[in-house]
Image: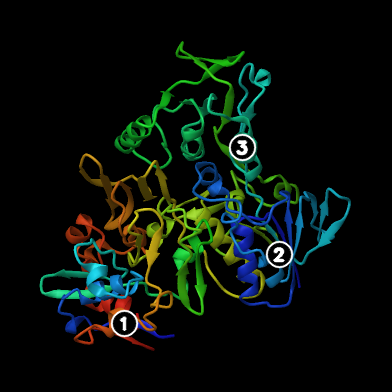
Amino acid sequence: MKRVYVNEKWCLGCHLCEYNCAFANSGCDDMVKALKDVQIYPRIQIEQGNGINFAVNCRHCEEPLCVKSCITGALSVQDGVIHVDQDKCVGCYTCILVCPYGAVMPGPTGGVVQKCELCTNNSSGEPACVKGCPNRAIVFEER
Amino acid sequence: MNYVIIGNSAAAVGCVEGIRSIDKTGSITVISDEPHHVYSRPLISYLLYGKTDREKMKYRPDDFYEKNSVTALFGVTAEKVDYEAKKVVLNNGSSVAFDKLLFATGSSPFVPPMEGLDTVPKKFSFMKLDDAMALEEAIGPQSRVLIVGAGLIGLKCAEGIRGKVRELTVVDLAPRILPSILDEEGSDMVQKHIEKQGITFHLGTSVARFGAEKAELKNGETVEFDVLVLAVGVRPNTALAAEIGCKVNRGIVSDEHCRTNLDGIYAAGDCSESYDITEDQYRVLALWPNAYMQGETAGIDMAGGNQLYDKAIPMNAIGFFDLHVITAGSYAGEAYVTRTEDTYKKLITKDNLLKGFILIGEIARAGIYTSLIREKTPLDTVDFELIRERPQLMAFAAPERAVKLGGAKA
């Protein structure tokens, strides 16, 4: 299955992936309106320090601990993509307790969780973070 | 192949999905003493709180049994297992034949003898959907509720009904709340937060006797109430398994394949014990994720596949009135503590391993800590100073990051 993979040495730490993620998931068609003067809650997040930068988002594990641990059944695997039904989620954060990548997080309201669904849940069509990466520091491919 | 599962919660669903990942055609029967489609028991407090409803709290979609070709017997109790004849005898007079059997029988509330308890007209447990619905029926805006038990069940119940009742009092024999998952400082912090919601605690004491709408406590105080919730503790349902000779300690003993000592008989979930790798001993780890994973392991093993359940640890994610708490592992070892007004963090290390942690208020990316415990990652292979400040993948060496994020083979 195609996943988002990191080429760490190419990452500039520019955070464009975070903005493109937030925009793609905003439901808004104007990037300025969607992002200006608002706190963004991207589902991909840059780690940086000591000259090293890389992006982290859901790995869509083949043995997903989040899905197996979810107490509500809100997390499920759909065609290999780990999907969260935010209507079912109650925000217990068991998925945050178990995700080894720290890739599930509370959404903007602080209640239910959100995560990368490879843009299958928005109108981007393919991962917006990858589309907008200037340096191929993240790629969407089979490995 | 005839697979039979006694129980219909997380372990049972894990078992069904485990079996069906390998065997698409074998017959599966689920025996459920409750009359409901599989639902999430921990959500009963969220149901009363208004954060979910009967539809949303279904753990799997309506077509779960049909899609997995499962015969689900609802509202039927397994009375006896005939191990020689390989059948489960039901309370409706019929029986179900099995080749492989899973005990996923869960646990039941434990109610210690208390003087005058018989005279309390409105008293409830808080384990099942029917308990929650009966409790909801019994309370109203003028209700004064007494909850006996300041553990996970009692306090989630308190949160669920706080907005629906006039007074809410919690009594526990232990000197602090949530002693099974928190240390003293953590208990204190969470207690103060819950008290701000108008909930009164009487800790380090117990009910001496119940009278007419009042409970006299051993510390001399009296609590007036009209609805009582008993959340003192639970006991694994092990009787059926013990009768046929399964080894039982506190729970049914099962190995890393979730097999019991009897051929073809498995146990998973709250009725069973698993090997806690942080304490190096068998324990009942009555936790939803563990139950699912045990059940799945059992199902895969029953169907001839191979899966190990060998990384069990105690772990909890729980919240009260928007204060989130995530804990895992054991707390014996060297502690690293940081505290602010709203947050508390404790990491416990021993023998070059992270053994446990407590996070209150700030829980982001906690699973990175959990994975250090579960994978027994030697701390000298990560930048521990970095990771103890906050959970992050930067603390792992570059080749390890390439595996985690770059698709490199481990």
Q: CA distance from mark 3 to mark 1?
A: 48 Å
> Which dot marks residue B264?
2
Compute the Cα span from label 2 to label 1.
43 Å
Task: Kindly identify which residue carries mark 3.
Answer: B109
Q: Position of residue B398 (x, y in %)?
A: 22, 76
Camera-nearest label, 2 or 1: 1
Location of the C terminus of chain B by quadrant is: bottom left
Give the letter of the chain under mark 1: A
Residue at x 38%, y 67% (from the top left corner): A115
Q: As shown in the figure, which amino acid type bears the numbered disc 3?
A: Pro
Secondary structure under tag 2 reads loop
Residue A5, labelled with which disc?
Answer: 1
Position of residue B400 measured from the top left corner of the image (x, y, whole percent)? 27, 75
Q: Nearer the viewer, mark 2 or mark 3?
A: 3
Outermost residue to the left: A50
Q: Residue at x 35, y 37 (%)?
A: B190
